[in-house]
Image (cartoon, grey):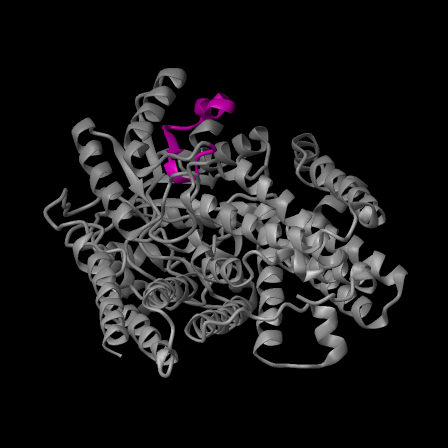
Amino acid sequence: MTKKISVILAALAIVALFWYLVGEVFILKSSENSISKLQCVSYAPFSKDQSPMLFDQGMVISEEQVREDLTLLSKYTDCIRTYSILGLEMVPKIARENGLKMLMGGWVSSDKIATEKEIKALITLASQNRDIVKAIIVGNEALLRGEVTDTTLIGYIKEVKKALPDIKVTYADVWEFWLKHPQIREVTDFVTIHILPYWEDDPMNIDASLKHLAEVRGEVEAILKEKNILIGETGWPSEGRMREDALPSKVNQAIYIRGFVKLAEENEWSYNIIEAFDQPWKRMSEGAVGGFWGLFDKDRVDKHVFAGDVSNFPNYKPLAFGSLLLLFAFSFLLRGSKIATKKVVLFGAINSLFAILFMLQAEQYMMTARTALEFGWAGLVLATHFFIYYFLLYNIAKDKKPEIINISAILKQKIFNADTSLMVLFYLSFVFLLISNLALALEGRYKNFDIYIFTVSAISFLWLYRGRFESMHFGRFEKASSLILAITTVAIFVNESYLNLFSDLWVLISVGFASILYMGSKKTALSELKNLALFMILFFGIFAYLRYGIFMNDAVAAQCNVSADSFLCTLRAKIGLFAYMHVFGEVAVAAAVVALFANKRVLSILALFLSIGALMMMNAFFGAIAFAVAVFVMTKNTTHKIAGN
């Protein structure tokens, strides 16, 4: 008993020390490059569940809300940059009240009617507020998005310059697009470039980011032969997924902003920081990272980007409490156990590790989940792994090896005990992983790596079933899943590169599951998957053409920007609308559910077709769910019978 208590106390101490270190010790100290005021900051008033997309539904931003925001910002900057003025016409008046100047923006898009309305309103508002308008920015990254041609954009800029000859006018875009369209410089009063090292095609880590920014600015100045340059957007996200070795974090955000401001002051650069407040609505189009570029969070709480100590886990105390509670509760499994000292130490080590990983994942979900669907997914994944966590410790404490039985036998025999429950959890976990892999492989730019929680299941099942994988007698579904996991894992590794530590860990987890599934389905010949493979290749080919030949084709996009009336452009617009509204994904899920219960081959083929369509048409999450179901339906009648351990 003394040894057990000693191990438990040691585990509690290790967990407490971990959270203390990440919360209080490994932090950015307040004395490191603290700053007082910024030249200019991007301002959007939206908070929590607000979004500019809701203006069409009657949303109104109150003057009180804007006044509170600008009163706060006036303590940290003398200027704000806006991106649109429709629905925000009160901003100039309130900016004046707070002594703020404006870089007033007008939104330019492929919608010509909406853009003309924006331009006219921009001209009117700027003419009424000449005293606070430092410059007008006509369009933001419209060329990057491929929504207008340079000729159309130049027309809008000239229209504004003609109406407001006494106010400077510019256009803002990622720096590469100024080099691709140097003719824009001929009609602007100065150049406004965006340099975001995190979002570069070759992402920069925090250590190389400022050097890269300085080099880019110098390159633009040299090529365009223009010294009058405004860095219109730069910054670093405080949360979100790692891109190669560019890691979003609260500490890295503070390091970047403080370092950049010092560099800008030394070189006398003009700049604008993105952005004032976290914008949760951006997570819908940019992934979780899109909502965390603010100097203040969505509730206007200071992130200490300007000054002060910065911790990546400012809420480490409740996280530590959660970990300690899990560890302590599961330690009761040792009661009455007669396992050897080595097993007790193993129990304590795994309990400590899993207690930390579980809370790290819970914290990540709390930061990144926004919709009911995202919270539902998070809850389901956490609940599944909570029980996996329990069963691993249970089997160690009782010195047991679980019985191996596949899902078909479980469904036929309808026997539910600890062993069958564990196998059900295995199936749930690898299906969750399969769904995540598909989404990461096809839309990985905006998806997070849930490495913490899936490390729990990978360790658990590799330990519990070690040496007995070939006794699992899996069938076609598991064989197909192992191959799909392998293919998508390669795609993820290639997309992310070895520099992304989160991706590297994810690859190891996926390889672990793929190995279990492949070894457990050795009696299933690859030839049995021939028809499934042929359908998949055919369907992926069809939708790859639609995606890259029409929807994401630069030539087609340019043609449609000139004239959107052709059948091809109408089709492209419909595809974009359906993708944005998740129509492809929802239809695919519905078809997969029907196929699951109808048990008709033609319906299963249709479900596979629609699921691959959803995957390729930017509805990867729903598409991945439908795809997993469709593959199961097409293979479920041929699993091998269990032969025993």
Question: At 38% from the left edge and 22% from the top edge, which residue is drawn?
Answer: 220
Depth check: 461 or 400 in front? 400
Depth check: 258 or 94 in front? 258
Q: Position of residue 17 (x, y in %)?
A: 21, 62
In this rendering, the answer to whether 167 lies above or below 96 is: above
Q: Quadrant of residue 309?
A: bottom left
Q: Position of residue 142 (x, y in %)?
A: 53, 39
In this rendering, the answer to whether 453 lies above or below 417 is: above
Left or right relative to 536: residue 75: left
Depth check: 312 or 630 in front? 630
- Quadrant occupied by the N terminus: bottom left
Counting the numbered discs, the total is: 0
Question: At 36% from the left edge and 78% from the top edge, which residue is drawn?
Answer: 334
Residue extending farthest bottom: 336
Left or right relative to 378: residue 481: right
Left or right relative to 103: residue 555: right
Q: Quadrant of residue 359?
A: bottom left
In this rendering, the answer to whether 65 lies above or below 127 is: below
Depth check: 493 or 574 in front? 493
Residue 310 covered by magenta stretch: no
Residue 521 in view in this figure: yes
Q: Position of residue 630 (x, y in %)?
A: 76, 60
Residue extending farthest left: 31
Q: Position of residue 439 (x, y in %)?
A: 59, 52
- Quadrant occupied by the C terminus: bottom right
Residue 196 in view in this figure: no
The magenta segment:
178-201
